[in-house]
Image: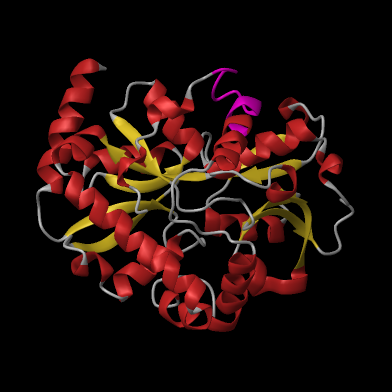
Amino acid sequence: MRRLTGFLSAAVIACSAAEGAEMHVSHFGQVMPSVPWIVALEQDLFRKNGVDITDVISAAGGGSTLRNLLAGGIPFGEVATAATVNGIQAGLPVKIVGIGVGNAADNDWVVLADSPLKSFRDVVGQKVGATTPGSLTSTFCNMLLKHNGIDPKQVTLVPLGVGASVAALDSGAVDTTYMYEPLQSRFGDKYRPIAKASDVLPKVAPLVLVASQAFIDKEPARLRAILLAHKQAVDFIYAKPKEVARLALKRMVNVDEPALQRAVERMVQARYWTAGPIDAEVLAGTRKLLEDTGDIKPGYDLEKIIDGRFMPK
């Protein structure tokens, strides 16, 4: 592991030095955390702040995003928190440098409108869709199961990609599955939510902004520039939400502008996006989430894996 860590550190330094590099975001173009990064690209905020990021690469979520981040492009990305913490505990040379969202208002578990399932307590013996182990929806699914007193062995967990979850529900391959915005706003009354992650844990960092230790040590100015561009994009979203859907539609997939506009308005109302330091309530919610799912033990010092020096004031 030590030899592998050294190799990855050297690789990300070499990649980050290149101009016109790319960064990694879980499920980019499919989910609402993508929106500030799209705004930053479309408004050329990276270049205006002195860093030449030309594109964002979508990753499958969980540990895949973290591994991709270390393998090439800018060694920075937005990654599921559980996968990040597990990677750090396994020795990967990364740290949390901020958050992009402060709650899980975009993440519900849904059933078909005519399903007999009325609440999440009814999923015992059923097939439940989530993404890959260690990813965001896998973490929330485990949290919801525990909250409702259900042993994971009492359900069949089916790993599904973001796009595949809807098709699986429609075909009967699963009885319930996660559904992110903007798909909820797109499909309207076709599906019915039976659980909301935000009802169980209203303040939490389901995703975190992650940078390699080499990037932190060698290129702090570029890291600050990326985070500043993100903050400027978030500020734009809250200042001009009606313009955001038009911009974001250029890189979002499987959604039309009216549905995306509804999703943006819903997330603005929930104060979903953030560009500041990790506040105490969000940190406490994140710790509880990770303890409940067994990703950390009680008393684990989350602060030691966070480097908050680079977030804009």
Residue 73 is situated, as x and y percent measured from the top left of the image, at 21, 49
Horizontal arrangement in the rendering, residue 63 relative to residue 271 (left or right): left
Residue 54 sits in which quadrant? bottom left
Which SS type dominates the magenta stretch? loop
Residue 49 is situated, as x and y percent measured from the top left of the image, at 21, 64
Residue 96 sits in which quadrant? top left
Residue 219 sits in which quadrant? top left
User: What residue sits 44% from the left and 52% below the top?
Assistant: 276
Q: Tell me if residue 150 comes above or below residue 138 in the rendering.
A: above
User: What residue sits 60% from the left and 65% below the top?
Assistant: 267
Q: Is residue 298 magenta?
A: yes
Residue 142 is situated, as x and y percent measured from the top left of the image, at 67, 34
User: What residue sits 66% from the left and 27% below the top?
Assistant: 292
Q: Which residues are magenta?
A: 289-299
Q: Is residue 77 magenta?
A: no
**Can the viewer see residue 57 in this picture?**
yes
Q: How is the image coloured?
A: secondary structure
Classify the position of the N terminus by image quarter. top left
User: What residue sits 30% from the left and 76% below the top?
Assistant: 43
**Can the viewer see residue 182 in this picture?**
no
Horizontal arrangement in the rendering, residue 202 relative to residue 116 (left or right): left
Depth check, front residue: 157 or 93: 93
Residue found farthest to the front: 313
Q: How many marks?
A: 0
Residue 136 is situated, as x and y percent measured from the top left of the image, at 54, 43
